[in-house]
C-alpha cells in the first residue's frame, strides 16, 4: 500500500515555506494554497498512501473527487465536490454524512479526507481564493491586546504544530437510539468519527498573546462563517482555563492530512478540539471572543446536550430551560467501541472438517474522551455473562517516539504527551467452532478513569453519546449450496438504509432494549405492549373486518371506522370527534388491511398508548383467497381518493426561500382534477418507485437537520432525496373544514352560512391551508362580502413564506375603498426598521389584527401545537371568542409534510 516514504513536505501542493506575510500585506504564496483547494488530484477509489516518516501510519493521498456529485446540483452546495461513497444522512442538504463502517475501518488509522464524516448545519461558506487569502481571525473581548490574524500571521507568529486527532460526532451510533424511540436527531451509524493529522497553532499560544484580562475572563467563544443559519452563526465556547492549557491540544488549524482543509471541513480555518465531541470544533472560524459568559449562540444551547432520559423528545423541544441548564452540556467524549469485522451481512462458511483449527479475528475500534486512554476492550460471546480481554493497538503511540519537523506540518512531536486523542483498534481471535456455538458478539471498552460502557442504553432526547455495548447478532444458516454458514448482523445501518437486528426485533414486537439473540422470545417493548388491551380476546376475521368497514356487515349502511395496527383491530368510533386530524384521518385508515406503517410513523408514543382504549380484537390470518375483497375500481374524475393511494410524479422543485420549496407533481392524466376542497389536506406517502397529467403543487418547509431541529423532519429528508420523475403517493382529501365560497363553510359536515369575516392565524409553514382560503376568496369576483384578516407569525423575515404573493394580494385587495384583506406579520427576530410587530402572538395582536368576535366571524388557525394551544386558544377566549363555535384549528407538526395538518 505504501509508496517510498517521502518527507511530509512532499505531500500535495501546499507551499513548503511558511508564509511570512502580515495582516496588512498577505503573502502572495497563499495564491498557491488557495488554488490547491479547487484543483485536487484525480479521485481514486483506493488510496495511494505516503508515510510521513518510516514506521508512522501512512497519510492518505489527496482524493477529492473531480466532479460535483449530482445530488448536490440543486443545492446551495452545488460547488462542493464530495465522495459519492459517503452515506447521506439528511437527504441532499445540508450535507451530513458518514462512510460505511467497513470502508472507514479498511481505510486505516488516518481517514482519507474524502471519507471523513461531515456534519454541516447549513450551506458550506463559499470561500474563494481572494477571501481565503484575506481570511481574518479576530480575537477580541476581555483581552489586553486585541488582534486580527491572517493565516499567514498565525504561521509566522506562533509555533506550527501537527497532532493526530479523532473527531467524533456526539450523535455517533444514534440510529440505535432512534430504533428505540425517535430522538431529535438523525440516524448516525457507527462511523460518525474520523481521524486526521491536523496542522495549526495551539489556541493556548494565541490566548497567551492576547492576554485575557483576569479575573473577569472566564470563557473562550468561537464563531464560524456559516452565518446564514436560521438562528445566526454557528458558535460555541470553552472554559478559559481548559482552553489555555496546551496539554488539551486545542488547535486553530488550516490543514488536514497535510493538505488544505476541504470546504466541508472548514476551509480555510477551523478549531479542532481533541477529546471532545465534534460539535465543539467550530469550522470556518472567523472570531474568538474572550468573555465573562459562555457562548450565547443559539446552537451552543440548543444542540449537543445530553438531557435526562426521562425527558421525551417532544417535551424536551417544548421546554427550553433544560437546554440552558449547564448540567447537561456535553464536552468530553465518553468511552465507546464498536465491532467492524465481522461486517454487517458478512457470511462465514463453516467447514466441519477444519472447524477446530479455523480462526476468525474479530476487530473493531474504541475511543475515550478528554485525552483519556482506552485501557480495556472486552468481548463476550455469551451475551454478557462472561468477558475476555481483546488486544488493543494504539497507532497514536507510534508518534510518541519520533519527532518530525517539517515546513508544512511544523512540529509533529508527541514525545512528551501522554494524552490519547485518537481512536484505537482492538482485535480478538476466536475459533470458528466457538462462533458456531454463540448467537451474538458483544464488545465493551473501559478507559483509564475506569469508565465502562454500559449494558443498557441511556436513551436521551437528542440521541447523543450512545455507548451501550455494541452487539452483532449471529445467524446460523445454510446457504443455497447446502453449506452451513454464519451470517452477521449489526444493530443498524446508517441513514435511511433498512436492516440490522434492532429493526428486525422491533418489527417483530420484541424489546430491543433487552435484546436476546438466538431466537429466544423477548417481551414486547413497552410502547407496543401498551397499545393493546390485554383483556381483549376477540378474533376478527378479515371478511368481518372488511364487511364492517365497507358497510356490508350485519347492520348495512353502518360503516365502522375500524383500522388495523400491528395485526390488532381498533374501533376509532369513540375518537372521531377528538382526533386532532379530524375524523377523516381515521376513516382513511378504515378498511386498510394494515395501517401500521402510516400510524406508527406519524404518531407520538403518547398517541400510541391511547390506542389501547379502542382495541377490539385481533385480525385472524385468514388467507386472502377466501375473502372477496371489495375492490375500489371506480373510475373517477378526481385524482384524490379517500380509500386508495394514487401516485403522481415529481415534475419540478422550485426553492422559494432558504428552507422552503414548491414541489410540483404531474397527475396521471391532464384531465384529472385534483379533488381537494379549499381548506382540506392530503396524506402523502413516499415510495420512490417507478409507476404509472393535471398537477398538484405542494409547498414544503424543509426541516432538515437544521440548528433548531437537529433531527430534521422525516418527510423533509425523504422529499429532499426525490428527483424529478420519482413517484409519490397521495390519498385524500381529509380535514373537517371546507370553504365552499361566499360565506358558506362546512365544518365536520355541518353546513354554516353567512360567514363574512374570517381571521386567519398562521405560524410559519401553517400558511399552507390558509393560503388556499385566501386565494379562493380573493379570486372569486362574485364574492364582495367576505373580508379576510391575516396574522402571520414567523421567526425571521426570511421565514415568511409566499411573501411576494401576500404583498401583491394586499396591494390589490387591501387598499380599495372596501378593503377585503389585511395582513399583519410578527417576527421573533425582526430586521432593523421592521414596521410590523415583534415577538410571539399576544392578546393585543389578536384584538387589533383580527375581526372582533361576532356571529358572522370565524377564525382559522394553523401553526405549531404550542402556539395553537397555549397562545391562540386561550387568547381568543380571553378577548371574547366562543372558540367552540368559531375557531377551527390545526397543529403543524415537525415531519408531517405537504400540508402541516394532522
Ligand atoms: N462549525 C460550523 N461553523 N458549522 C457547523 O455546522 N458542525 C459541528 C462542528 N463545527 C459545525 C461546525 C459539528 S456538530 C461537528 S460534529 C463537527 O463540526 C464536524 O466536523 P467535520 O464536518 O469536519 O467532520
Image: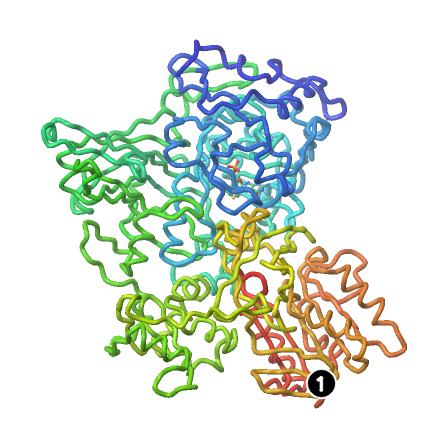
Among the 4 quarters of the image, the one containing residue 759: bottom right
Q: Is residue 10 above or below residue 326?
A: above
Q: Is residue 541 above or below residue 453?
A: below
Residue for point 80% across, 67% down: 809
Task: State ligand 1's quadrant.
Answer: top right
Among the 4 quarters of the image, the one containing residue 839: bottom right
624 left or right of 689 in image? left
137 left or right of 402 in image? right
Q: Is residue 289 visible?
A: no
454 left or right of 354 in image? right
Foreground residue among 773 and 293 = 773
Q: Is mark 1 within 8 Å of ligand 1?
A: no
Q: Secondary structure at mark 1?
A: loop
344 left or right of 821 in image? left
Q: Position of residue 733 (x, y in %)?
A: 56, 71
Q: Is residue 511 above or below residue 679?
A: above
The extreme bottom residue here reads 855
Q: Is residue 876 visible?
A: yes
Q: Position of residue 314 (x, y in %)?
A: 48, 64
Foreground residue among 221 and 15 = 15
Residue for point 25% across, 33% down: 362
Residue bearing the label numbered 1 = 755
Q: Position of residue 611 (x, y in %)?
A: 37, 74
Amino acid at each position: 500500500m505504501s509508496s517510498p516514504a517521502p518527507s511530509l513536505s512532499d505531500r500535495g501542493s501546499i507551499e513548503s515555506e511558511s508564509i511570512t506575510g502580515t495582516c496588512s500585506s498577505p503573502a502572495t504564496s497563499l495564491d498557491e494554497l488557495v488554488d490547491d483547494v479547487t484543483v485536487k488530484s484525480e479521485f481514486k477509489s483506493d488510496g495511494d498512501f505516503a508515510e510521513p516518516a518510516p514506521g508512522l501510519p501512512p497519510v492518505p493521498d489527496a482524493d477529492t473527487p473531480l466532479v460535483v456529485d449530482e445530488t448536490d446540483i440543486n443545492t446551495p452546495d452545488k460547488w462542493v465536490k464530495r465522495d459519492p461513497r459517503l452515506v447521506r444522512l439528511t437527504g441532499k442538504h445540508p450535507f451530513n454524512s458518514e462512510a460505511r463502517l467497513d470502508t472507514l475501518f479498511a481505510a486505516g488509522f488516518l481517514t482519507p479526507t474524502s471519507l471523513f464524516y461531515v456534519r454541516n448545519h447549513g450551506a458550506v461558506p463559499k470561500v474563494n481564493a481572494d477571501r481565503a487569502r484575506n481570511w481574518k481571525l479576530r480575537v477580541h473581548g476581555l483581552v489586553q491586546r486585541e488582534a486580527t490574524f491572517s493565516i499567514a500571521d498565525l504561521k509566522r507568529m506562533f509555533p506550527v504544530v501537527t497532532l493526530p486527532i479523532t473527531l467524533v460526532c456526539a450523535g455517533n451510533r444514534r440510529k440505535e437510539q432512534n430504533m428505540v424511540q425517535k430522538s431529535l436527531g438523525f440516524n448516525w451509524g457507527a462511523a460518525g468519527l474520523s481521524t486526521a493529522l491536523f496542522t495549526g497553532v495551539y489556541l493556548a499560544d494565541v490566548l497567551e498573546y492576547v492576554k485575557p484580562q483576569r479575573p473577569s475572563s472566564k470563557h473562550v467563544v468561537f464563531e464560524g462563517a456559516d452565518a446564514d443559519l436560521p438562528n445566526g452563526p454557528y458558535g460555541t465556547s470553552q472554559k478559559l482555563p481548559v482552553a489555555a492549557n496546551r496539554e488539551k491540544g486545542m488547535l486553530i488549524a488550516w490543514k488536514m492530512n497535510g493538505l488544505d482543509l476541504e470546504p466541508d471541513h472548514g476551509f480555510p480555518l477551523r478549531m479542532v478540539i481533541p477529546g471532545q465531541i465534534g460539535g465543539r470544533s467550530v469550522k470556518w472560524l472567523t472570531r474568538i471572543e474572550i468573555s465573562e459568559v459562555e457562548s450565547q449562540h443559539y446552537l451552543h444551547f440548543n444542540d449537543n446536550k445530553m438531557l435526562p432520559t426521562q425527558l421525551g423528545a417532544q417535551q424536551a423541544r417544548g421546554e427550553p430551560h433544560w437546554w440552558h441548564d449547564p448540567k447537561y452540556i456535553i464536552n468530553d467524549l465518553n468511552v465507546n467501541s464498536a465491532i467492524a469485522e465481522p461486517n454487517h451481512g458478512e457470511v462465514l462458511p463453516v467447514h466441519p472438517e477444519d472447524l477446530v483449527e479455523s480462526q476468525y479475528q474479530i476487530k473493531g475500534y474504541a475511543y475515550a474522551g478528554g485525552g483519556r486512554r482506552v485501557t480495556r476492550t472486552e468481548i463476550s460471546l455469551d451475551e454478557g455473562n462472561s468477558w475476555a480481554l481483546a488486544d488493543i493497538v494504539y497507532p497514536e503511540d507510534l508518534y510518541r517516539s519520533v519527532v518530525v519537523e517539517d515546513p508544512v506540518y511544523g512540529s509533529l512531536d508527541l514525545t512528551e504527551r501522554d494524552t490519547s486523542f485518537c481512536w484505537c483498534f482492538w482485535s480478538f481471535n476466536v475459533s470458528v467452532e466457538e462462533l458456531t456455538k454463540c448467537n451474538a458478539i458483544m464488545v465493551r471498552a473501559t478507559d483509564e478513569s475506569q469508565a465502562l460502557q454500559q449494558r443498557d442504553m441511556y436513551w436521551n432526547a437528542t440521541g447523543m453519546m450512545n455507548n451501550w455495548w455494541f452487539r452483532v447478532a449471529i445467524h446460523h444458516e445454510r446457504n443455497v449450496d447446502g453449506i452451513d454458514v454464519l451470517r452477521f448482523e449489526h444493530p443498524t445501518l446508517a441513514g435511511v438504509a433498512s436492516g440490522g437486528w434492532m429493526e428486525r426485533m422491533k418489527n417483530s414486537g420484541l424489546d430491543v432494549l433487552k435484546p436476546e439473540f438466538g431466537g429466544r422470545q423477548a417481551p414486547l417493548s413497552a410502547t407496543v405492549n401498551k397499545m393493546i388491551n390485554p383483556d381483549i380476546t376477540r378474533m376478527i376475521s378479515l371478511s368481518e373486518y372488511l364487511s364492517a368497514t365497507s358497510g356490508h356487515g350485519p347492520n348495512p349502511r353502518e360503516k365502522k371506522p375500524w383500522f388495523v395496527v400491528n395485526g390488532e383491530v381498533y374501533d376509532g368510533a369513540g375518537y372521531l370527534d377528538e382526533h386532532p386530524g379530524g375524523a377523516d384521518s381515521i376513516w382513511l385508515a378504515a378498511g386498510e388491511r394494515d395501517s401500521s406503517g402510516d400510524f406508527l410513523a406519524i404518531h407520538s408514543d403518547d398517541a400510541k398508548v391511547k390506542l389501547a382504549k379502542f382495541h377490539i380484537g385481533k385480525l385472524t390470518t385468514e388467507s386472502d383467497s377466501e375473502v372477496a375483497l371489495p375492490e375500489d375500481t371506480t373510475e373517477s374524475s378526481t385524482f384524490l381518493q379517500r380509500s386508495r393511494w394514487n401516485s403522481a410524479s415529481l415534475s419540478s422543485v422550485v426553492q422559494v426561500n432558504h428552507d422552503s420549496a414548491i414541489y410540483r407533481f404531474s397527475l396521471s392524466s391532464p384531465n384529472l382534477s385534483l379533488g381537494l376542497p379549499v381548506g382540506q389536506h392530503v396524506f402523502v406517502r413516499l415510495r420512490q418507485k417507478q409507476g404509472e397529467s393535471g398537477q398538484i403543487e405542494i409547498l414544503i418547509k424543509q426541516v432538515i437537520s437544521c440548528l433548531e431541529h437537529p433531527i430534521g423532519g422525516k418527510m423533509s429528508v425523504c422529499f429532499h432525496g426525490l428527483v424529478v420523475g420519482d413517484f409519490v403517493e397521495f390519498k385524500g382529501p381529509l380535514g373537517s373544514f371546507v370553504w365552499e365560497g361566499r360565506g358558506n363553510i362546512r365544518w365536520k359536515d355541518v353546513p354554516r352560512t353567512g360567514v363574512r369575516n374570517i381571521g386567519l392565524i398562521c405560524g410559519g409553514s401553517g400558511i399552507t391551508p390558509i393560503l388556499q382560503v385566501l386565494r379562493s376568496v380573493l379570486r372569486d369576483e362574485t364574492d364582495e362580502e367576505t373580508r379576510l384578516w391575516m396574522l402571520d407569525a414567523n421567526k425571521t423575515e426570511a421565514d415568511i413564506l409566499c411573501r411576494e404573493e401576500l404583498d401583491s394580494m394586499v396591494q390589490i385587495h387591501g387598499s380599495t375603498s372596501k378593503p377585503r384583506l389585511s395582513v399583519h406579520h410578527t417576527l421573533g427576530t425582526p430586521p432593523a426598521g421592521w414596521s410590523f410587530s415583534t415577538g410571539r402572538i399576544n392578546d393585543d395582536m389578536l384584538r387589533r389584527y383580527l375581526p372582533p368576535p361576532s356571529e358572522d366571524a370565524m377564525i382559522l388557525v394553523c401553526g405549531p401545537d404550542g402556539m395553537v394551544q397555549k397562545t391562540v386558544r386561550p387568547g381568543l377566549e380571553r378577548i371574547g371568542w366562543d372558540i367552540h363555535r368559531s375557531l377551527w384549528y390545526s397543529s403543524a407538526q415537525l415531519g408531517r409534510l405537504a400540508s402541516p395538518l394532522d
